[in-house]
Amino acid sequence: MRRQAGTRTVMVRVLGRFGGMLLVVCGAATAGFIALRLIPGDPVDVMLGVNARVSESVRDQIRADWGLDQPPVVQYFAYLSQLVTGQLESYQLRQPITEVIGTQALPTLQLTSLALLFAVLLAVTGALLARGKHARSAISLLELFVVSSPTFWIGLVLLAVFAFQLGWFPVASSQGFASLVLPALTLALPIAGIISQVLRQGLDAAAAQPFATTARSRGISHSRLVLRHTLRHASGDTLTLTGYLVGSLLGGAVLVETVFARQGLGQVAVRAILGRDIPVVLGIIVLAATVFAVVNLIVDLAYERIDPRLRTAVTA
Amino acid sequence: MSTLTATRQATAWRAAPVGVIAASLFLLLIITAAITPTLFSMYDPLKADAAASLQPPSAEHWFGTDQAGRDVFARVVHGARYSLVVGFGATLLALMVGIIIGVIAGSAPRAVDSVLSRVIEIVMAFPEFLLALVVIAVIGAGETSLLIAVSVAAIPAYARVARAQTLLVRRSGYVRAATALGVPRFRSTIRHIVPNALGPLLVMGTIGVGTAIVAAAGLSFLGMGPQPPTPEWGLILSDGRNFLATAWWIAVFPGVAITATVIATSTVGRFLRQRGQS
């Protein structure tokens, strides 16, 4: 009985989140379309490049081919259906955007997932080490430093030290795990700083509770107290924050891929933005919105797994 | 009441930790560099000197020289202006637009409020940097675009806080008293609600300046802001990227400048926030 009610609330929540996700994606797609129309200048110019000399009749032909001579409302619905079926084409590459993005998604996925793993590991390590006054102030200083530094600068420094001076990692390559370590670390550090700050606050709050005192009076060690008891209490807020930060990993990937000259969605995005290739930009926006919504849904569901108090609160 | 507040403020000022004082002094230094860069460096940030290219830091060139023989210290000092203008300008712009949207949402009928809140929520689903990139994609690259993009990306957060503050202040006794006395709504919004909702937003803005500086440096690193040979911090870093193997100083020092500026603004911002809470 209780279980059923729990399942139903989860279903309702998943559906609600799904609705919200559709709203975000639709909103992003519509805003993208408006942006497409707002762009000063002729899209045909963007397609042909600045230096092209083409007669007016050819321009008209291109316009007709791309449906740019139709009324805006017709264009909007044509655009939406192209977006849904994945047939929206890049202005510059003359390929469907699903192909453009699909072929470059894997390197970025590898980079961001490893970065997320690094960030969580670093944050938890920091929280475990932050014991005693000196360690605490050292770690909070470190946090302030990585949070305040521009991601791409951290990347440049790591590159200068570990790739050029020490030669531990390859300088610029998209192949193999070794080439992934420095970029992932670069992307992870600022996020690790933020997660670590929130995690420590949560751990301190949990450590002040009676159950922590009881555990300590049993003679439990600090790391065991954190790993077995307070970490679970602190992980709720931390998890929500981490879900929120996954989105910013994608933004950071744009910079990190440029610093390390790696293939990936970031490079696709930079090229599309500088070349005003709006369909591709749009595809990336929709992808980012989808990733954000899915990750936050997972976080919400995981939250209940970690904190049983929430489960009873929901079903009661 | 007022004496109590005054005393509390006085103690808070006296209790300003060393870090906060150092941060304020550093900010003052950066602001001076932005206004009169020639005070700090006699070198021209744009003058190339092929004979002196890629020299390591020395007594003559504190931060070394770049590939064209330009003094990196002079370039960093002159770059303060660009970063501060974008950092403060974009934050100010975002604050103003955010307050207008937030106050309208917070005092408008429920239908308007929920539409605005929903829009803010949707926009906030995108990370700030991605949002700034999208704005650049629409309006094109350039110095002004950079400021607008960084500003637009920050608006939703300010609008959300401004809305929450408006809802809070609107319920207070003095606003209701003003309404009862027949003060027109618009006037009461301008005279009572906005000034009283401002506090937390200004503190948020102080911390936001740092975020704006980092975002602007990132965008211009990608080539979406000012063009070379402008001595802008992000641009110098992107120059330095190509000489990392032989001349680390080109890429390291502008980054130190950005980081130090951001740490200084956020230290001051956090201090102000703490003081506002206690």
Image (cartoon, coloured by chain):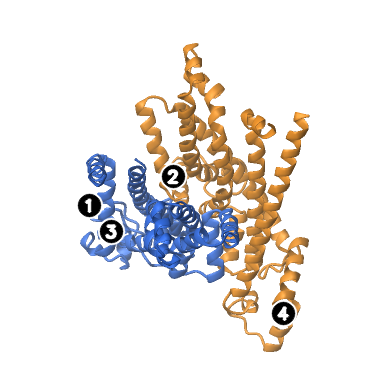
Q: Nearer the viewer, mark 1 or mark 3?
A: 3
Q: CA distance from mark 2 to mark 1?
A: 32 Å
Quadrant in which the C terminus of chain A appears = top right
What residue do we see at 27% from left, 66% from top?
B44
Asked whether residue B209 appears in the rendered view, the answer is: no
Q: Nearer the viewer, mark 2 or mark 1?
A: 2
Tell me the subunit letter for badge 3: B
Identity of the amino acid at label 1?
Ala
Identity of the amino acid at label 2?
Val
Tell me the subunit letter for badge 4: A
Chain painted orange: A
Q: Which residue is mark 2?
A: A147
What residue do we see at 54% from left, 37% from top?
A238
Q: Secondary structure at mark 2?
A: helix
Q: Which residue is mark 1?
A: B59
Identity of the amino acid at label 3?
Ile
Q: Is residue A60 above or below residue A258?
A: below
Q: Position of residue A170 (x, y in %)?
A: 54, 44
Tell me the subunit letter for badge 1: B
Q: Position of residue A189 (x, y in %)?
A: 48, 42
Q: Position of residue A254 (x, y in %)?
A: 55, 55
Q: Which residue is mark 3?
A: B31
Q: Nearer the viewer, mark 4 or mark 1?
A: 4
Identity of the amino acid at label 4?
Pro
| Mark toward the start of the polypeptide (2 vs 4) | 4
Tell me the colour chain B is drawn in.
blue
Q: Which residue is mark 4?
A: A71
Toward the top, the furthest residue is: A218
